[in-house]
């Protein structure tokens, strides 16, 4: 891919990678993209971009793209290219036969955070109206579902509290379990600018990420905690604030529940949450915890930013609520420069959650057991709605292995690579009577599929992505749809073939209109408005016609802020003699998630394999040379990686990325998950590492 030529037109659109949601101008010559230029009017990126987004257009025209539908009777047979009608007819016939034989709850779907909100809307609508159940889940299950749960319990809505620009007013930044330099690079630059202006940084991470020490930025504190001990740390930070007179009593009295605060203050002041107790659990010296707490609670406006290093734990939801408690108790919520801010991994993970891609919630985070909400959707869709939550992704796998879940439609996700405990996932996929995969490429999951429906790249899509700051960004088609059918139209065709034909949409804009009609926080949103006025942050409705950059300004969405007791419970995944090291995972700047897209761009040159970082002392003890191959063995499985000695790691903790399928990091991860949401505990796996021959 070479950037060249003079464009004859430009199309404004949105990056398809991370949750920053940068705006770009796609420069085209005919129907060929020749360059992606960051848009200076983009409200999330202000004219900046990163090396991922700048070259993302490469994968859209990669030779691996599948552009024709394919079917096969069994997964041992070769694929047959067929027409769209035949593929959709085949899929619908099998799905209906499966329901006839095994019951209406025997099939379901997984939606994609890389698709637009309109595409996701149609998938959950198909499940609820045509499949007649709630077996719809999303890849947020494996990343930020604890954010949704935790922030809803405490504040009343499942979303980050601030816009990105709010960081420019922060005096103290508490960064927990996130590595924005690699994973959210444009926001990292904005954060670094603020740090260079004098804001103070606290990093809580087992690994010494770049922001701990980078040119002109040095963290005031690096709390290098043991993986799996976040909750003990955040409780200790709150303990110091509560016992040293650093709480914002006026804020708590005015804005928070009296009873839940009284219970919480008793809990948090207990010695079990002291810095000394936390030091014994986390490995972080008590004095460092105390100093960091004083800085957060007493250093001015303090903002929390966090990532998957918070959520992907057995106590992921507890940790989100622990951070929410801390922010409320210190009055760091509801104005610029403060807040609790999830850094979302995928471009539209906020949007896919907003669109009701959950087995227990309709769009707008309304529980399926709520009679009034069900009545709204029953009236609109003219089909009875199930009051029982459906299956989460891990339950789908379990029930597939048990023989009661038999049919699955997967939109734009490579669950065979991205979900934990690969052996179990593969067994589940093999057991299905019908697996339909919709994707750009024949991914790992497609090995088990009977129907492959080619998807469209972001350059072909018409719709919206919603970024980590709840910003609804337009995605506009720059090149013709290579598959002959827009992705939303594919889902609609399958819905029709399943026998549900109420309301046939003729455009993505019409789908947005249904979203606005049925989702109160989107009431004033339409494609026409976004095209006219630019992006907007939800809630955007009669009460907030210009959108909502900062939430919970005058009151929490739920009314009074709710404190939750966040007792630390150690994960069951422990190091022992046989598996003495703890493996944790993360991302690298040039690659995106499982790499299906970014490995098919210019970025492939910069990172062609995942490596295992380990401390030189751990390497020396095992005779592992820098750059040599090692086997990584856990209670679940074994993989082989190249070793890299790294002082970033504390002794006893090793680290890898997960961008390459041949690495198979999830071969070793466990089935442990968050107690509230089933989000997998990717960040804590006990392993042993030993020299190995090459793969
Ligand atoms: Fe922006 Fe993220 Fe895309 Fe980079 S990957 S250009 S930071 S949206």
Image: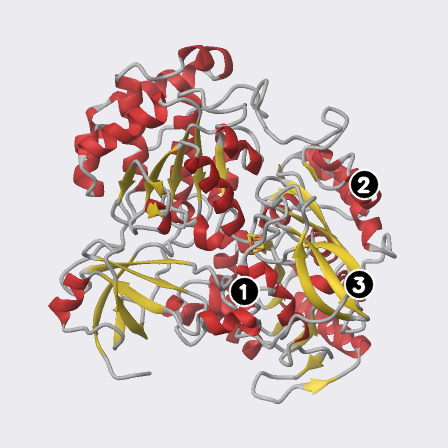
Residue 297, placed above or below residue 575: above
Q: Name the residue under label 2.
A: 379
Residue 215 appears in the rendering:
yes
Quarter-of-image position of residue 9: bottom right
State the residue in front, 396 or 153: 153
Q: Which mark is residue 404?
A: 1
Percent of width and height locating residue 284: 21, 40
Percent of width and height locating residue 390: 58, 51
Mark 3 surroundings: few (<14), some (14-19) or many (≥20) residues within 10 A: some
Tell us which disc is closer to us: 2 or 1: 2
Q: Judge from the rendering whether residue 367 lies leftward or rightward of residue 417; answer left or right.
A: right
Q: Name the residue under label 3.
A: 489
- Which structural element holds mark 1? loop
State the residue in front, 437 or 588: 588
Q: Residue at x 54, y 36 (%)?
A: 160
Tell us which disc is closer to us: 2 or 3: 3
Where's the N terminus, which quadrant?
Answer: bottom right
């Amino acid at each position: 891919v070479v950037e060249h030529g003079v464009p004859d037109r430009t199309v404004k659109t949105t990056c398809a990678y991370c949750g920053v949601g940068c705006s770009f101008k796609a420069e085209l010559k005919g129907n060929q993209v020749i360059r992606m230029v960051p848009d200076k009017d983009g409200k999330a990126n202000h004219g900046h971009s990163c090396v991922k987004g700048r070259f993302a257009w490469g994968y859209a025209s990669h030779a691996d793209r599948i552009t024709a539908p394919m079917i096969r009777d069994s997964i041992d047979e070769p694929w047959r290219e067929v027409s769209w009608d035949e593929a959709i007819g085949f899929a619908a016939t099998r799905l209906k036969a499966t329901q006839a034989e095994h019951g209406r709850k025997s099939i379901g779907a997984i939606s994609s955070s890389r698709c637009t909100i309109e595409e996701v809307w149609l998938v959950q609508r198909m499940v609820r109206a045509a499949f007649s159940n709630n077996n719809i889940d999303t890849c947020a299950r494996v990343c930020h579902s604890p954010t949704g749960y935790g922030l809803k319990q405490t504040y009343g809505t499942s979303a980050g509290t601030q816009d990105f620009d709010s960081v420019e007013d922060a005096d103290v930044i508490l960064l927990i379990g996130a590595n924005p330099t690699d994973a959210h690079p444009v926001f990292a630059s904005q954060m670094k600018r603020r740090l260079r202006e004098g804001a103070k940084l606290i990093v809580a991470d087992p690994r010494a990420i770049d922001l701990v020490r980078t040119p002109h930025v040095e963290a005031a504190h690096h709390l290098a905690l043991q993986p799996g001990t976040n909750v003990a740390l955040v409780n200790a930070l709150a303990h110091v604030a509560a016992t040293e007179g650093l709480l914002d009593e006026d804020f708590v009295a005015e804005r928070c529940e009296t009873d839940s605060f009284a219970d919480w203050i008793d809990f948090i002041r207990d010695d079990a949450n002291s810095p000394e107790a936390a030091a014994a659990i986390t490995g972080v010296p008590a004095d460092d915890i105390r100093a960091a707490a004083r800085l957060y609670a007493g250093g001015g406006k303090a903002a929390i930013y966090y990532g998957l290093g918070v959520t992907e734990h057995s106590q992921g939801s507890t940790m989100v609520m622990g951070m929410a408690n801390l922010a409320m108790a210190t009055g760091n919520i509801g104005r610029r420069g403060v807040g609790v801010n999830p850094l979302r991994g995928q471009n539209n993970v906020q949007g896919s959650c907003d669109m009701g891609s959950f087995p227990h919630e309709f769009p707008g985070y309304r529980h399926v057991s709520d009679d009034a909400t069900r009545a709204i959707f029953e009236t609109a869709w003219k089909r009875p709605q199930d009051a029982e939550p459906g299956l989460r992704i891990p339950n789908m796998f379990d029930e597939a292995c048990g023989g009661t879940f038999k049919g699955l439609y997967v939109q734009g996700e490579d669950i065979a690579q991205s979900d934990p405990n690969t052996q179990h996932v593969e067994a589940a996929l093999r057991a299905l009577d019908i697996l339909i995969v919709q994707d750009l490429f024949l991914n790992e999951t497609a090995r088990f599929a009977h129907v492959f429906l080619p998807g469209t790249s972001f350059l072909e899509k018409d719709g919206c992505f919603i970024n980590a700051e709840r910003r609804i960004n337009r995605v506009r088609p720059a090149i013709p749809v290579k598959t002959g059918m827009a992705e939303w139209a594919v889902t609609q065709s399958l819905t029709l073939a399943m026998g549900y034909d109420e309301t046939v949409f003729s455009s993505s804009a019409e789908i947005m209109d249904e979203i606005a009609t049925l989702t109160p926080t989107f009431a004033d949103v339409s494609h026409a408005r976004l095209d006219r006025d630019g992006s907007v942050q939800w809630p955007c409705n009669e009460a907030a016609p210009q959108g909502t950059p900062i939430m919970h300004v005058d009151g929490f969405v739920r009314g009074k802020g709710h404190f939750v007791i966040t007792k630390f419970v150690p994960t069951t995944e422990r190091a022992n003699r046989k598996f003495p090291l703890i493996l944790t995972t993360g991302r690298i700047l040039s690659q995106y998630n499982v790499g299906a897209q970014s490995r098919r761009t210019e970025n492939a040159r910069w990172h062609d394999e995942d490596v295992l970082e380990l401390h030189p002392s751990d390497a020396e003890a095992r005779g592992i040379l820098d750059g040599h191959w090692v086997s990584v063995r856990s209670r679940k499985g074994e993989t082989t990686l190249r070793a890299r000695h790294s002082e970033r790691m504390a002794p006893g903790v090793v680290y890898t990325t997960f961008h390459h399928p041949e690495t198979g990091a999830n071969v070793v991860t466990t089935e442990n998950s968050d107690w509230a949401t089933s989000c997998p505990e990717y960040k804590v796996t006990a392993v042993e590492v030993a020299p190995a021959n090459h793969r």
